[in-house]
Amino acid sequence: GENVEQHPSTLSVQEGDSAVIKCTYSDSASNYFPWYKQELGKRPQLIIDIRSNVGEKKDQRIAVTLNKTAKHFSLHITETQPEDSAVYFCAASNSGGSNYKLTFGKGTLLTVNP
Amino acid sequence: DGGITQSPKYLFRKEGQNVTLSCEQNLNHDAMYWYRQDPGQGLRLIYYSQIVNDFQKGDIAEGYSVSREKKESFPLTVTSAQKNPTAFYLCASRDRGLQALHFGNGTRLTVT
């Protein structure tokens, strides 16, 4: 089955700096890669996703890049703000059908210091 | 107001007792999922169901059971056979043809 590795487990940055979180996956058939943000005590919420036919996607201060050959993808947050502090999870999945499921990384605790 | 409702938010049980966690969705989603979250472990898949009356084991199904008698409901039973049941449990659903999961607010189960 799919295995997703996520690094680093914790990341501390100063407000205004950039933050980068990296993930690798094992199943070359995976084609969908979402990122979720989970604030303390709350539900994970989708912040951005990318499909395998795209190399990069941006949404304001957030961007995700995908390298299918190397089987890794990254989340980039620019101009970080204290409200970006949360746990971020990457995930990978296959194309769908009757066996569709998401496999998650172990998460990165991002702390943005004012 | 559409969404996924998990109840209760906090649940306390004595060791050896079975306990059932509720998950209801009014999004008309076909697929539903149960994940377990432990500190530093990420989200691990327990069971999932793509359609009513059908479900599959995830990566850590031992000690758990589910049912999917209605499209909108996917209850999870934590049995006494689960060795470390204390955790945060998250239910999610997915619309047919789409790949994103939508999560409920979770139930924090404490077994002593």
Image: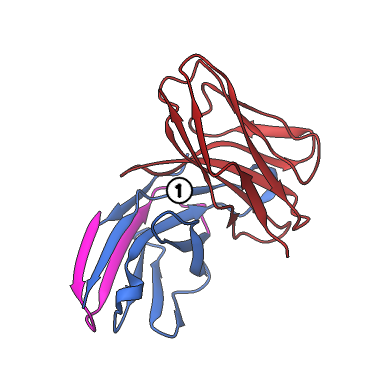
Chain colours: A blue, B red
Residue at horizontal 48%, vertical 58%?
A44
Q: Say left or right for A3 vs B105.
A: left
Q: How many marks?
A: 1
Residue A43 visible in the current orientation: yes
Q: Say left or right for B85 vs A22.
A: right
Q: Position of residue A107 (x, y in %)?
A: 34, 53
Rendered view: B91 above or below B67: below
**Which residue is denoted by mark 1 in the rendering?**
A27
Q: Position of residue B23 (x, y in %)?
A: 66, 43
Which of these two is toward me, B41 or A26? B41
Rendered view: A89 above or below A82: above
Which of these two is toward me, B69 or A1? B69
Which residues are drawn in magenta? A8-31
Residue A72 visible in the current orientation: no
Q: Say left or right for A70 vs A47.
A: left
Circle 1 marks a residue in which chain?
A
Which of these two is toward me, B15 or B46? B15
The kind of secondary structure element at disc 1 is loop
- Quick one: quadrant of the C terminus of chain A? bottom left
Residue at horizontal 22%, vertical 63%?
A11
Residue A108, quarter of picture: bottom left
What amino acid type should be assigned to the residue bearing mark 1? Asp
Residue at horizontal 58%, vertical 25%?
B19
Residue A74 covered by magenta stretch: no
Q: Position of residue A38 (x, y in %)?
A: 42, 59
Residue at horizontal 52%, vertical 16%?
B80
Which of these two is toward me, B102 or B5? B5
Residue A55, quarter of picture: bottom left
